[in-house]
Image (spheres, coloured by chain):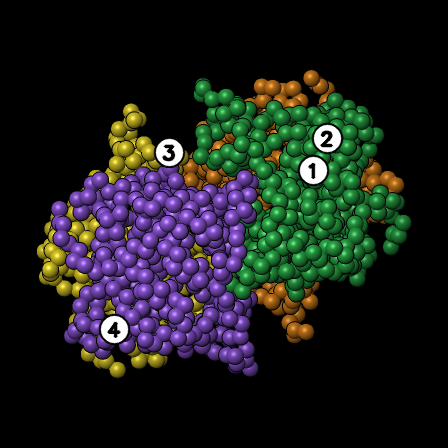
Chain colours: A orange, B green, C yellow, D purple
Amino acid sequence: MSSFTKKDFLQDVVQHIDIKAHNVVSLVDDMGKTAFQARNLARAAKIYDMMLNDKDCAVILTLAGSLISAGLKQVIIDLIEHNMVDAIVSTGANIVDQDFFEALGFKHYIGTPFIDDAILRDLHIDRIYDTYIDEDDLRICDDTVAEIANTLEPRAYSSREFIVEMGRYLEEHGKDKNSIVYTCYKKGVPIFVPAFSDCSAGFGLVHHQWHKPDAHVAIDSAKDFRELTRIKIENDTTGILMVGGGVPKNFTQDIVVAAEVLGYEDATMHKYAIQITVADERDGGLSGSTLKEASSWGKVDTALEQMIFSEATIAFPLIAGYGYHKKGWEGRVARDFNAMLSQSQELDVK
Amino acid sequence: MSSFTKKDFLQDVVQHIDIKAHNVVSLVDDMGKTAFQARNLARAAKIYDMMLNDKDCAVILTLAGSLISAGLKQVIIDLIEHNMVDAIVSTGANIVDQDFFEALGFKHYIGTPFIDDAILRDLHIDRIYDTYIDEDDLRICDDTVAEIANTLEPRAYSSREFIVEMGRYLEEHGKDKNSIVYTCYKKGVPIFVPAFSDCSAGFGLVHHQWHKPDAHVAIDSAKDFRELTRIKIENDTTGILMVGGGVPKNFTQDIVVAAEVLGYEDATMHKYAIQITVADERDGGLSGSTLKEASSWGKVDTALEQMIFSEATIAFPLIAGYGYHKKGWEGRVARDFNAMLSQSQELDVK
Amino acid sequence: MSSFTKKDFLQDVVQHIDIKAHNVVSLVDDMGKTAFQARNLARAAKIYDMMLNDKDCAVILTLAGSLISAGLKQVIIDLIEHNMVDAIVSTGANIVDQDFFEALGFKHYIGTPFIDDAILRDLHIDRIYDTYIDEDDLRICDDTVAEIANTLEPRAYSSREFIVEMGRYLEEHGKDKNSIVYTCYKKGVPIFVPAFSDCSAGFGLVHHQWHKPDAHVAIDSAKDFRELTRIKIENDTTGILMVGGGVPKNFTQDIVVAAEVLGYEDATMHKYAIQITVADERDGGLSGSTLKEASSWGKVDTALEQMIFSEATIAFPLIAGYGYHKKGWEGRVARDFNAMLSQSQELDVK
Amino acid sequence: MSSFTKKDFLQDVVQHIDIKAHNVVSLVDDMGKTAFQARNLARAAKIYDMMLNDKDCAVILTLAGSLISAGLKQVIIDLIEHNMVDAIVSTGANIVDQDFFEALGFKHYIGTPFIDDAILRDLHIDRIYDTYIDEDDLRICDDTVAEIANTLEPRAYSSREFIVEMGRYLEEHGKDKNSIVYTCYKKGVPIFVPAFSDCSAGFGLVHHQWHKPDAHVAIDSAKDFRELTRIKIENDTTGILMVGGGVPKNFTQDIVVAAEVLGYEDATMHKYAIQITVADERDGGLSGSTLKEASSWGKVDTALEQMIFSEATIAFPLIAGYGYHKKGWEGRVARDFNAMLSQSQELDVK
């Protein structure tokens, strides 16, 4: 048994980087005249700026990997607040375990990967590479999801609908309003988590269903797909800014095909697409598959696509900051897709 | 417009490797005396063999990446048929777009990544790295899912329940009975796809729901989590064989915590854990996160865990083949978790 | 035969990024409060700043990968000119094929990896990932090396000595004096290329030796090692800034051991060490091996070491720019190790 | 201070895998019908078999990474003994620190990367990822190189010439004749180490030169390049089997250009080329650069080239074993390039 206490490890709080404070436009522009990934990063930043200047373009942000715990929350909030993002598709950890968790007043702590995990285990500290979380805080986050579910009418919800309810909860109970879930709630930006049980929300929902076997909230991932496809149907021009790959990447690319399947045969491919990833294409997996490959599936146009091979904590603030400081967002308005999706959706079955 | 036809590209069929035909035991044993990933591979193979010899151990196989299109279907079928796997957690593509697709009589074709994707796009050929698919065949697969959904009572299903229905469909209509979905159906091995809409099934289900707005099938991912957690609750000793990372990895590791959340505070960590992946841990993402990190979360025991850094088409047949030819499975019986899960599940709420 | 001409491909010149124009200090400081590689990058930048503030510290820069062709030449020149680097150990390509090549008046061009290399082959265009070179220009570079060798007294030279002669050549014939080789020549900063034949210099030297079989210039890599070790012997405190791995990394780490072998048993490990690399440690290769592993060999102290997992075009300007704008170099003086090394070296054989 | 002793860590000896004992032909053939890296591995194995069946083809093996310490020594010896390799280009560590080291009677030990390197440092144990070496043994290896150098006539040698002397030393003093250096010595297979000082040999040679400042052995890397180019000049058809990248890869690819520079303008590109590597092409570095890129430089023909993305301890025995058991080597004879290179070389200056 080690003589450490939890406090020894949970000292320095991860602080979220503020793209507004760093004008990286000239830096990124100069990177564009060099080579390799600096040039790719600059091209991606320019494509993002093009999306923002294309007033018809609905911008979908996809998030995979542990981004919020890694200090990227403020980047995403700034994108939402300045109408630089119209919808979000994410893994559950980012939205529930990390953003909603911080909104409940909890924190992520600076740690190290060079540690004996048995010590952490004993102390109820969970590790994400070089970052620590108080596991007891996380259990409260799980419970809060169960509590929210317990208040809802038993039926099938999309993850988006449930996350709206999480935003509503934060309105009253949130301790840190600087939250992705809360900001999206206020602005009507939908958040989709296609594998919603695969995170803290899963624990809460299992607890909810276990104790209410007869009538309970269900999370219908098909409804998520239907709603996200709706956004494609309503927006001829779409662009995707992908941080990491995984389910959010695939799910978002797929809506072009889904629109076709629903009879919208003139649905256009995503016009703009950029992805930040360290995944390798050589294992044939989706996370590292090229956007050119996606074009064979009819999902992404190849004229304005760019992959950037970089870990996200370095590349994402540079790309987002470039978009912010170029001010292409100034003429954009909030789209409030949540309002659109809440209206009856199946009026126009083809 | 190119002068190619679809037939020019869809010629050579991917053939599934047969581990039964290759006794790799001495090869793998000798690898274990060398270093680096050969030694890791051998240790992983030995841990898998230990799982099989531990008659109390429920073995969960997780699948991410395009494995079936890549010729690994027979490996998985052999594991199922020889009671070497008791439950499967997978991405949707493997189960629906690829295995169910082949069961409908369609094929994957040998291709190349060095191709102009615009030509493929024109010909309705979809590419997965170096493999081709006839997109028109895939649309039939989507439609078949919709057709199955249309026959079902409207309610919330776990993906597992829906996949059982897909197996039942194959019983009557399947053209190639050498199928993971069908073999699992017969043997009662549950298949969970936590992000079930993120694949061909999503297209079918969106179509189904779109045309039946008032009463339709929903896929409840919380129910998936509840059912998979049930397996942990019922089996004190568990081992996980992970091919790739992603949602299947996380979801399966999480059931230890979920059991605790449900009051089973003595739920034990996964005793055995091996993962084949090329993902890097340095981006902090889940796919490449070490199993030691998972131990800080209380999910995986560290005594018998092993990561193997290798692309799966090379490493998985060697590990599975080692397990097969060592015959540790001979004393094992089929667990038929599907039967257990179909019974009333919430009898013992704590 | 394609209808392209060389000119179609050799249009846009790679431009070298200027760290002096971008004050990244606050950006990098803020990265240090986040996680993953952004935090690692910031810690590395701070360690570099510590090296510069430690007036006793001799700073050795190691270069592997195609860095000069990729627009990083000016970064390195700025480090040299501001006494932020006291010695360089590099692969040959950076120094000869790329820097010396540009000093002769030639350029690198912006290209793309998505190109049919057969077309480039026909046009005598050489490709480095996304960058193009006129192969005919490169032949002139080879010939110039042969020409320089032809003027020298036949004996064994260290690569450092030969590169000094290349600097001397540029004094008279250089078309672009903004050159690493030339700047080092003026400032007395030694450049070592331990595998000197493995580049354009090799072609020139083979030509020289082939035509002068009886008496010619030889490049003695043992002399390189002896000279570099001398720098360790004369400088108790050393720090290494490594861009990529390969021979330059290993060679530079090894001088601690070499000093011991020569009887300087109190030779201290490199006190500071940072490495930018995308290489993976899991193949057991040197390029990706951790600096902690190097400490088991007695080469690198672990208190102030940091690996950064990032492609160099993104990370190197940020780290170098941080060091530049923090101005730790202001109190440093040029060490002119070339002068020291040119003096008789073996006076103090132990 | 830990209470461990050296013996606690240096227990289990790494054992070299024997490809002769494992007939992998049908396994590899079946891999060729699947996808991704298994298919690439099979294609590479077939290309290697084609090299062996092409009786005009001189086969050059390049080695980078820690391969001998990792249990691959016997694989390479078997290739040499069965005339499956005609020349070797390697990093120094493989040849001197590892093979020559074992020939002196020392061993590599099975270790773990999950260890506190400070403990190893205290015990004089050097770590290569998961393998341990007794540092005191390594010092004897360094000294032996110095001892050999001390017996030689002072002049410039190619690394090949020096390694021949190492083989000669082993004839009398070797404790383990199952050695690459010794087997090559007997068979006349040249070994080139273009960065010869970058290994244990460097320590020995620095010691030698330091104590004999006036007249000593020099290692002329230009002579290495000249000699290796000679092999290209004398062999119209060449094939390269590359394990890892680095200097050996580049150096060997470059000899086609070097032959042209010497006036042999009809020198043909390497007809066959395969590379096993985990390096990524996206950093623009040479180790991961594609063989297609090399074709733009006129170095490698693209008809019969294949990259395999796999760590070498897994892939190399499979490819080498395939070549061995297909018996394409049966009709081949030993080429004894050492004899050719020892003759006067510059008779035919153009």
Q: How much space separates mark 1 and mark 4, taking CA atoms?
A: 66 Å
Q: How much space separates mark 3 and mark 2, taking CA atoms?
A: 44 Å
Residue at 79% x, 52% y is: B333
For the residue labelled by badge 1, is the local secondary structure a helix, a strand or a loop? loop
Q: Residues within 10 Å of mark 4 (few under 14, many from 20)?
A: many
As drawn, is A132 to the left or to the right of D219? right
- Check the image and report above or below for C23 versus D7: above
Q: Quadrant of residue B274?
A: bottom right
Q: How much space separates mark 2 and mark 4, taking CA atoms?
A: 74 Å
Picture coordinates of residue C187 (x, y %)?
Answer: 21, 60
Q: How much space separates mark 1 and mark 2, taking CA atoms?
A: 9 Å
Q: Do labels 3 and 2 touch, CB within 8 Å?
A: no
Q: Residues within 10 Å of mark 2 (few under 14, many from 20)?
A: many
Q: Give the position of the N terminus of chain C as an image quadrant.
A: top left
As drawn, is D251 to the left or to the right of C322? left
Residue at 34% x, 40% y is: D301
Q: Disc 2 marks which amino acid?
A: Gly
Residue at 50% x, 21% y is: B5
For the residue labelled by badge 2, is the local secondary structure a helix, a strand or a loop? loop
For mark 2, name the chain: B
Q: Disc 1 marks which amino acid?
A: Ser
Viewer-side residue, B141 vs C342: B141
Residue that numbered label 1 is attached to = B179
Residue that numbered label 3 is attached to = C115
Q: How much space separates mark 4 and mark 3, taking CA atoms?
A: 49 Å
Q: Disc 3 marks which amino acid?
A: Ile
Residue that numbered label 2 is attached to = B174
Residue that numbered label 4 is attached to = D149
Q: Quadrant of residue D68?
A: bottom left
Q: How much space separates mark 1 and mark 3, taking CA atoms?
A: 40 Å
For mark 1, name the chain: B
